Amino acid sequence: MNVLVIGSGAREHAIAWSILKDPRVQKLYLAPGNGGARELGAIAERAPIKATDIDALLAFAKTKRIDLTVVGPEQPLELGVVNRFQAEGLNIIGPTKEAARLETSKAFAKAFMRRHRIPTAAFETFANHDEAKAFVERQTKFPIVVKASGLAAGKGVVIATSKSDALEALRAMFEQRLFGDAGSEVVIEEFLQGEEASVFVITDGEHYKLLPTAQDHKRIGEGDTGKNTGGMGAYSPAPIVTPDVMRNIERHIIQPTLRAMREEGTPYRGFLYVGLMICEGEPKVVEFNARLGDPEAQVVLPLLETSLLEILLATLDGRLRELEVKIADKCAATVVMASKGYPDQCETGKLITGQCHFELACYAGARDDVMIFHAGTTFENGKLYSNGGRVLSVTAVASSLEECLARCYDAISQIHFEGAYYRRDIGWRALRNLQTQR
Ligand code: AMP
Ligand code: GLY
């Protein structure tokens, strides 16, 4: 079986690594992938095609007789990669662009949740600056949350602690067009108190299977301070999602969402990522994403005991109901090593040395519990260089979160590049929760 994975992050490295555990794979291509592809062995190869070049991806899939394509990031979903592949009779995992609006248009997602009484923050949507301003002027309670409706690489959300901050956010979106068309429609919503968690499902449109839960660390600074990033680390499972909370999420969020998507004529197939705020045991949707998270995939996938390839094939064939998805009774953690300056302008092209050169495959291999997933790396003339904001996602699996984190930080201490930055407090909330539960 020939497989194509679209994307270039650590999430896609982890997806490829996970799929390759299945002996049915003959060849796996990453388009465009990163410097980590060579760690996967001769079976894996990079295809120099951008994740957004749908014509080239389609031509490649036909030429290479690809049996299954998996979409990592959201941009190709918005561009209709799934619609195009399906129209040509090619197997692909992901929602159509219509179904992907759950992520690509926050205005759509919020209106959908309101229509179907799915718990979420109270909100209003505006396509007009003056009306949005007038709404903010009437508010008496802060913070409020101002969001660009469209895709903004995780940067289009402003938690405004005052009226003037909210008005400033509106100016940035409507006047300065900081997020381009993504900010021509704006959602203003209630600020939710609580603790965040991410729940992942894979669905064939009708049935779904739960994947491990996770918690991300979006802020650049320790103690969850500073700017929002793509994600600086994650762990799984998220202790805040107790079995009771999960039952509630399935009944009041996942099942009604999938049912309503079918009823509206846009059945949702693929990975669905539900970002939640859990407030005194009550979950509310903060956002939907039409894909796996990054860095959450790096902790969710290593905990699957059932073959990911088998799960994906069952999803395509509508056999998901019969499939038992086994999850290891373990924990996983990942710590992201980023370039100096991230999430703003950052320094790249730095030589990466230590256990993360190609020996890292041996390191990971020798200790099957440590995986170094690459993000912004490139391999040139036998050397590994940084090539982006988030560089490596150092991951460990163990029987306790403490042990996972110890292994991640031990591995990190053996990896070097100039200006490397990582948070030293990944998992702090879970460690605190676990301590109070003990
Ligand atoms: P989003 O892109 O919608 O997930 O927003 C990014 C981050 O902003 C979330 O992960 C939350 O940390 C925060 N956030 C978004 N919406 C809210 C809200 N209504 N209340 C509190 N925090 C929020
Ligand atoms: N880790 C957040 C995301 O993938 O959107």
Image (cartoon, helix red, strand yellow):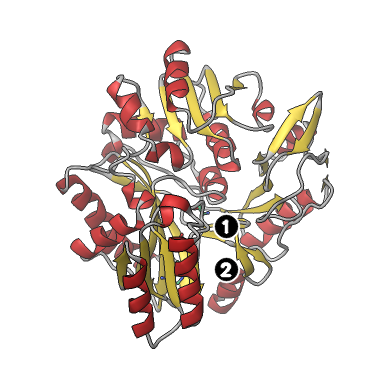
| Crowd rating for badge 2 (residues with CA inside 10 Å; few <14, some 14–19, many 20+) | some
| Extreme residue in the bottom direction | 140
Give the residue type that dot 2 points to. Ala
Q: Which mark is residue 377?
A: none
Is 35 placed above or below 249 here?
above
Label 2, on which residue? Answer: 430
- Check contact, mark 2 vs mark 1: CB within 8 A: yes
Would you call the spot at circle 1 few (<14 residues within 10 Å), some (14-19), or many (20 or more)? many
Q: Residue at x 39, y 42 (%)?
A: 325
> On the picture, is 221 further left or further right than 331?
right
Q: Which residue lies under the disc numbered 1?
A: 235
As drawn, 211 above or below 166: above
Q: CA distance from mark 2 to mark 1?
A: 9 Å
Q: Nearer the viewer, residue 26 or 171?
A: 171
Residue 354 visible in image:
no
Q: In the depicted view, which residue is nearer to us: 104 or 407?
A: 104
Residue type at tag 1: Tyr
Q: Nearer the viewer, residue 213 or 294?
A: 294
**Does dot 1 land on a helix, a strand or a loop?**
strand
